[in-house]
Structures are given as structure tokens and as C-alpha cells.
Image (tube, rainbow, N blue to C red):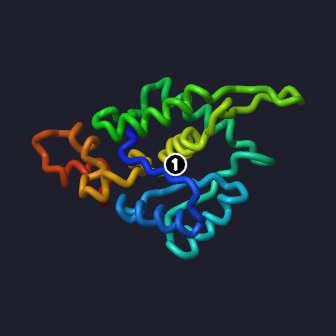
Amino acid sequence: QEKQIVYMWRKKGMKIVEQAKEIARISRDFDNPYFLVEQNNIGIDLLDELIDTWNVNVEGFVTGGVGQKKEELILFLVQAFEREQISMPQGDEHSRQMMYIVEEELAKFRTTRTPAGKEKFEGVGAHDDCVMALALLNRATQHVSVPFAVASGEALSAGVNPYENIVQRTDKHESELVNMIRLGLIK
């Protein structure tokens, strides 16, 4: 299944309550898709807020400790790129800027060895937030058939259909609404 990033949102320094509110808004704007949240110390509080306050369709994903699923998550993302299943938009200036950030993080993501000799994946000399978000989104698509969306405020606030690029790739003789139903974007 081909997946295309259609929306990206990132902002530093937000409190968990504010993050949850924004994620809930994005969820509503995209017809309540399935979300995965990294289940770490902060992630648990975010999960609770998203579920209890906003009723978002979300699950936690353990990436460290006993679960050690981070490697599985990253390998799954690598496979998606190798199979050319992920499209990164390069259309307008905003898209290019956002994808540049993601590409920079991807370029600095490496396999390193712990002092005990075990392999681990991490951003070397850089943050890995975008890589982890992309890996979680990629994994979330295995639970549903709708291509994923990463969030960024410009498109929705401008009234742009976030699925427009996906819908345009389908049958040109059908309406956008029919194409969205066939793609599973509308049920």
C-alpha cells in the first residue's frame, strides 16, 4: 500500500494538555483516524489525555525497556522506503521545508552499539522525533487501510482538502467524493 504524507504539524514547548487538544483537532479534521503514540513517560500522560478528555482513536506503542519494539518499528519503516511505499510531498515551499526536516533526521539516523554490544537505532547528533513519528504512522497503517497523514497547520486552516493529492491519483472520471469513498477515506 502506498502511503503519502499529506499534513505535518510540529511545535516545541507545548504542555501535554495543549498537545492533546491540537491532536484531537487534527483527528477530527481527518475523520478520526487511528493513532499510535510512543508510550514512554510523557507518552502515557498524553495517551490518557487523548483518550479520557478527547476520545481519540489512539493506542500506545512501547519503544524501549522490556518491549524493545523500536528496532521493529524502524526496520518496518526502512522496508516501506525500500519498497517505495512512502511518498514525501515536494510540491509547495512549505511541503519542501517540512520534508527537508524529516529527510535531515532520516539521514542522521543510525544503528549504533551499546557498551554491552547490542545494536540500537538512534538519531546521531540530531533529534529523532520526526523519524519516530513517521515510523509510528507507518506502523499504524497496518491496522487500517487508509493512507496516513502527518500534521502541519497551514493546509487545514486554509480549507485545503488534506487528501487532495491521493484522490487526484484515482479515476479522473469519478467525483472526488466517489474516489474518497473508494479509497476508504469516507465510510
Image position, residue 105 (x, y; %): 56, 33
Disc 1 secondary structure class: helix
Which residue: 43% across, 58% down?
A: 33
Given residues 78 and 179, the one toward you in this image is 78
Q: Residue furthest right?
A: 116
Q: Position of residue 158 (x, y in %)?
A: 26, 56
Q: Answer few, some or many: residues within 10 Å of disc 1's Cα (few below 14, many 20 plus, some between 14 and 19).
A: many
Residue identified by numbered label 1? 140
Give the residue type at disc 1. Answer: Ala
Q: Looking at this view, is 186 or 58 the one in front?
A: 58
**Horizontal side of residue 3 vs 38, given as left or right:** left
Q: Position of residue 51 (x, y in %)?
A: 56, 70
Task: Check the image and name the residue furthest to the front.
Answer: 13
Taking the spot 25% from the left edge, 46% from the top edge, the residue there is 164
Taking depth in this image into account, of 81 and 143 the one nearest to the observer is 81
Residue occupying the point 50% across, 72% down? 54
Q: Image height check: is 6 above or below 42?
A: above
Return the x and y of residue 113 as percentages of the image width and height.
79, 26
Quarter of the picture holding the N terminus:
top left
In the image, farthest residue toward the left: 173
Residue 130 sits in quarter: top right
Q: Quadrant of the C terminus?
A: bottom left
Locate residue 127 relative to residue 170 in the image: left or right: right
Residue plotted at (72% across, 58% down): 41
Q: Is 147 placed above or below 186 here? A: above
Direction from residue 40 to residue 33 in the image, left or right: left
Name the outermost residue toward the top.
82
Question: How many numbered circles are shown?
Answer: 1
